[in-house]
Amino acid sequence: MSLAERDRAAAPAASGRRPLPRSLWIGLALSAVFVVAAALSFLWTPYPVDGMNIPARLQPPSWAHPLGTDHFGRDILSMIMVGARTSIAVALLAVGIGMALGVPLGLAAAARRGGLLDEVIMRANDLIFAFPALVIAILITAVFGASAVNAIVAIGIFNIPVFARLTRGAALSLWEREFILAARVAGKSAARISAEHILPNVANLLIVQGTIQFSLGILAEAGLSYVGLGAQPPTPSWGRMLAEAQTMVSLAPHVALIPGLAIVFTVLGLNLMGDGLRDLLDPKVRKART
Amino acid sequence: MLRYTLKRLISLGVSLAVASLVIFLVVEVAPGDPAAFMLGINAEPEAVAALRAELGLDVPKWQRYLDWVGGMATGDFGTSYTYRTPVAEMIAERLQVSLPLALYALALSTALAFPAGIYAAARRGRAGDLAVMGATQLGIAVPNFWFAMMLVLLFSITLGWFGAGGFPGWEAGLWPGLKALTLPAVALALPQAAILARVMRSSLIEIMGEDFMRTARAKGLTRRQALWRHGVRNALIPVLTIIGLQFAFLLAGAIIIEQVFYLPGLGRLIFQSISARDLIVVESVVMLLVFAVIVVNFLVDLAYAAVDPRLRRRT
């Protein structure tokens, strides 16, 4: 063995790096397919998504239409690409809402642990937890009408207590640690400690949970637009593609099969990515597995 | 235990009161007057005023809230704006479909998840475990309404074993009713079973690392005996919480699944009411679902405390 070879062989151990978990790679690759498809759809789709072509309706997959056509003769591949945009945008913004409101609430509750603020925040969280995302969506839609924005708000509200609880739980144990005590002795305010020391230390957990909520958001968006509470026509969405396909399942199964598979692969990809990230970022899991 | 029960009972009451207030206020900000909506734009102001009085919309908001909550406590949910029939009757009729569906799905998901989770935990790290975990990973990713459509495609359209939808009513007998709910229940149960199996597995694996499990083996129990007598029983505690949570989600999830199978349950009622702007029905159904979640969580908490006295001391 040459010296260079030996160095290379020893390198991973020396720097303490481990190979990335396989689930992370698979998940990343699966999710990337849909993110790229969504991004590409802004520039190019094989056919225009509103291009109806009745004579070419309900065609099975072919070279001209790799995923076939729907009941209006629209190209399903193009619709899946644009639909990915809707799914990703709704789920991502909903995670954003959940984090933007939930994390500060969780940090504040932990900073005032045992106090009135903590109690109020946690009880409010319990209350939101009693409203499943679908129920929030029903309530919002009944009052303000159905739209993608209302779907985002509904799923976003549902995400708030998830992030608030996670942040509070993790922050509580951090507040007992010496380095936080040092920061307190140094005269930093609770708000500054939360922002400068607690937040960076819960970031890993938040990223993992964010991935999981992202995948749940994709499922929720699909369900909401399936029952007509999400994105409205003409915006293509996977859930509505399925709703429209429902009456045609027997005539052209692919019309119902393909949007469903798109959802499954996206969610599966995100979940695998979440698992992989957890293995990578959470030292407790790492120790337990090795 | 009595003290704990009382404390939890008070917090249950507060939760229900706040939840009902939130629902009432959200619906209150809805633009438009139901009476004006029902009579159309050309209605005479007097007719609208008369209808408002008939619907009880002419009293102050706080009094309407108290009437609504007080009514619900006594089983009077008000009168539907569009059908002019008592909301309680409409809900009771739809619950005959939605409630059995949710319970059926809960039973299926538990029956599926327990053996799968226990099997995976006992075979931890081996092929059987990997297969179960792979299947659950897939199960979690599948949207239940799409899975339902695929079930219809396979079992109704291709094989012809089940009807593609609709509900004959319980008057037709127990068996036709159950048969009509089977595919919906399977669709609803499978993704939940995947989650439950994972919880069961990780809970059991954690328990198997405990000292008392080693003691059980040391006193001469076989692996299998130790697993069943001490492992599974102790692993059930977190699993029960998830089952409690799942019941509420199954009831809400039934709303979507009912759309796939054209079942006359709460789901169809709520979507009809949304498009007809029959807000009092929407309000009441939403309150009922939230009530179910809160009460089930309360019961799970109590069951916990009954099983494990240590929990009573914490809040």
Image (tube, rainbow, N blue to C red):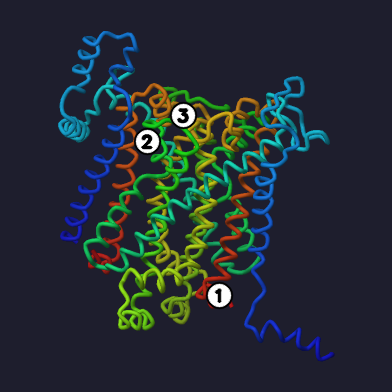
Of the pair A170 and B295, the residue shown nearer to us = A170
* Residue B104 rendering spot, x and y as whole percentages: 45, 40
Amino acid marked by disc 1: Arg
| Residue marked by disc 1 | A286
**Secondary structure of residue under mark 1:** helix
Marks 3 and 2: CB-CB under 8 Å? no
**Which of the 4 quarters of the picture holds residue A287?**
bottom right
Q: What is the CA distance from the residue labelled 3 to the residue labelled 2? A: 30 Å
Of the pair B245 and B78, the residue shown nearer to us = B78
Q: Is residue B60 left or right of residue A99?
A: left
Chain ID for label 2?
A
| Residue marked by disc 3 | B177
Relative to B237, is A43 above or below? above
Amino acid marked by disc 2: Leu
Looking at the rendered structure, whether the residues under marks 3 and 1 are on a common chain is answered as no
| Residue marked by disc 2 | A139
